Image (cartoon, rainbow, N blue to C red):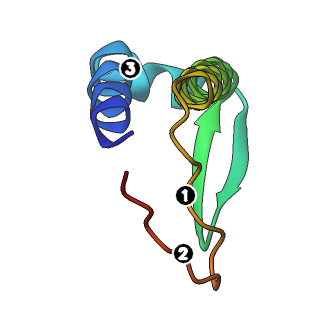
Amino acid sequence: MTKHLILFASRMRRAFRQEREKTLRQQDIRTVCIQEQIICLSEQEAAFVALETSRLLRAQRQEAKRKKRLGIPPPPAPGKIAYAVYM
Protein backbone atom coordinates (compact mmCIF):
# COMPACT_ATOMS: atom_id res chain seq x y z
CA MET A 1 0.00 0.00 0.00
CA THR A 2 2.87 2.39 0.79
CA LYS A 3 4.30 1.81 -2.69
CA HIS A 4 0.95 2.77 -4.22
CA LEU A 5 0.78 5.95 -2.15
CA ILE A 6 4.31 6.95 -3.16
CA LEU A 7 3.50 6.34 -6.84
CA PHE A 8 0.25 8.28 -6.44
CA ALA A 9 2.08 11.25 -4.90
CA SER A 10 4.75 11.31 -7.60
CA ARG A 11 2.14 11.08 -10.39
CA MET A 12 0.16 13.88 -8.84
CA ARG A 13 3.25 16.09 -8.50
CA ARG A 14 4.22 15.47 -12.13
CA ALA A 15 0.72 16.02 -13.46
CA PHE A 16 0.09 19.33 -11.78
CA ARG A 17 3.50 20.93 -11.18
CA GLN A 18 3.34 23.18 -14.24
CA GLU A 19 -0.38 23.83 -14.30
CA ARG A 20 -0.95 24.33 -10.56
CA GLU A 21 -0.43 28.09 -10.47
CA LYS A 22 -2.38 28.68 -13.69
CA THR A 23 -5.35 26.57 -12.64
CA LEU A 24 -5.55 28.09 -9.17
CA ARG A 25 -5.88 31.53 -10.72
CA GLN A 26 -8.16 30.56 -13.60
CA GLN A 27 -10.59 28.05 -12.12
CA ASP A 28 -12.81 28.14 -9.09
CA ILE A 29 -11.08 26.76 -6.03
CA ARG A 30 -12.81 23.91 -4.23
CA THR A 31 -12.04 23.31 -0.56
CA VAL A 32 -11.55 19.68 0.43
CA CYS A 33 -11.13 18.47 4.00
CA ILE A 34 -8.75 15.57 4.49
CA GLN A 35 -8.58 14.40 8.10
CA GLU A 36 -7.60 17.57 9.98
CA GLN A 37 -6.06 19.52 7.11
CA ILE A 38 -7.85 21.69 4.57
CA ILE A 39 -6.40 21.94 1.10
CA CYS A 40 -7.66 23.81 -1.93
CA LEU A 41 -8.01 21.94 -5.22
CA SER A 42 -9.24 22.99 -8.61
CA GLU A 43 -11.92 20.90 -10.28
CA GLN A 44 -9.30 19.19 -12.46
CA GLU A 45 -7.14 18.31 -9.46
CA ALA A 46 -10.15 17.07 -7.47
CA ALA A 47 -11.15 14.83 -10.39
CA PHE A 48 -7.61 13.45 -10.59
CA VAL A 49 -7.55 12.73 -6.84
CA ALA A 50 -10.94 10.99 -7.07
CA LEU A 51 -9.72 8.87 -9.99
CA GLU A 52 -6.50 7.85 -8.20
CA THR A 53 -8.38 7.13 -4.97
CA SER A 54 -10.81 4.83 -6.76
CA ARG A 55 -7.87 3.14 -8.52
CA LEU A 56 -6.11 2.53 -5.18
CA LEU A 57 -9.28 1.23 -3.53
CA ARG A 58 -9.89 -1.14 -6.46
CA ALA A 59 -6.32 -2.47 -6.18
CA GLN A 60 -6.84 -2.94 -2.44
CA ARG A 61 -10.07 -4.93 -3.02
CA GLN A 62 -8.39 -7.10 -5.65
CA GLU A 63 -5.50 -7.80 -3.28
CA ALA A 64 -7.97 -8.78 -0.52
CA LYS A 65 -9.77 -11.16 -2.94
CA ARG A 66 -6.44 -12.69 -4.00
CA LYS A 67 -5.42 -13.28 -0.39
CA LYS A 68 -8.82 -14.78 0.39
CA ARG A 69 -8.47 -17.22 -2.52
CA LEU A 70 -5.01 -18.22 -1.27
CA GLY A 71 -6.38 -18.80 2.23
CA ILE A 72 -4.48 -15.97 3.90
CA PRO A 73 -6.56 -14.72 6.84
CA PRO A 74 -7.49 -11.02 6.94
CA PRO A 75 -5.74 -8.78 9.45
CA PRO A 76 -7.44 -8.49 12.85
CA ALA A 77 -9.83 -5.63 13.50
CA PRO A 78 -8.40 -2.82 15.63
CA GLY A 79 -8.69 -3.66 19.31
CA LYS A 80 -9.03 -7.42 18.73
CA ILE A 81 -6.55 -10.03 19.84
CA ALA A 82 -5.27 -12.24 17.03
CA TYR A 83 -3.54 -15.58 17.35
CA ALA A 84 -1.21 -16.88 14.68
CA VAL A 85 -1.79 -20.50 13.73
CA TYR A 86 1.12 -22.27 12.07
CA MET A 87 0.77 -25.63 10.39
Tell me whether the residue at label 2 lies in contact with that at label 1, contact meaning CB atoms closer than 8 angstroms.
yes
Q: Nearer the viewer, mark 3 or mark 1?
A: 1
Disc marking residue 75: 1
Looking at the image, residue 15 sits to the left or right of residue 47; the answer is left
Q: Residue furthest front?
A: 87
Residue at (73%, 30%) from the top-left corner?
28
Taking depth in this image into account, of 48 and 58 the one nearest to the observer is 58
* x, y percent for residue 25: 54, 29
* Residue 11 position by quadrant: top left
Q: Which residue is mark 2?
A: 82
- Residue situated in front as seen by the camera: 58 or 32: 58
Of residue 29 and residue 35, the one placed in the foreground of this image is: 35
Q: Disc 3 on helix, strand or loop?
A: helix
As measured in the structure, the alpha-carbon distance from the residue carrying label 3 to the one carrying label 1 is: 36 Å
Q: Nearer the viewer, mark 2 or mark 1?
A: 2
Against 41, residue 7 (above or below) is: above
SS for callout 1: loop
Q: Is residue 37 above or below residue 86?
A: below
Which image quadrant is residue 80 in?
bottom right
Residue named by callout 3: 16
- Viewer-closest of 18 and 52: 52
Q: Amino acid at mark 2?
A: Ala
Alpha carbons under labels 2 and 1: distance apart: 8 Å
Mark 3 or mark 1, earlier in chain: 3
Label 2 crowd (10 A; few <14 / some 14-19 / many >=20): few
Q: Amino acid at mark 3?
A: Phe
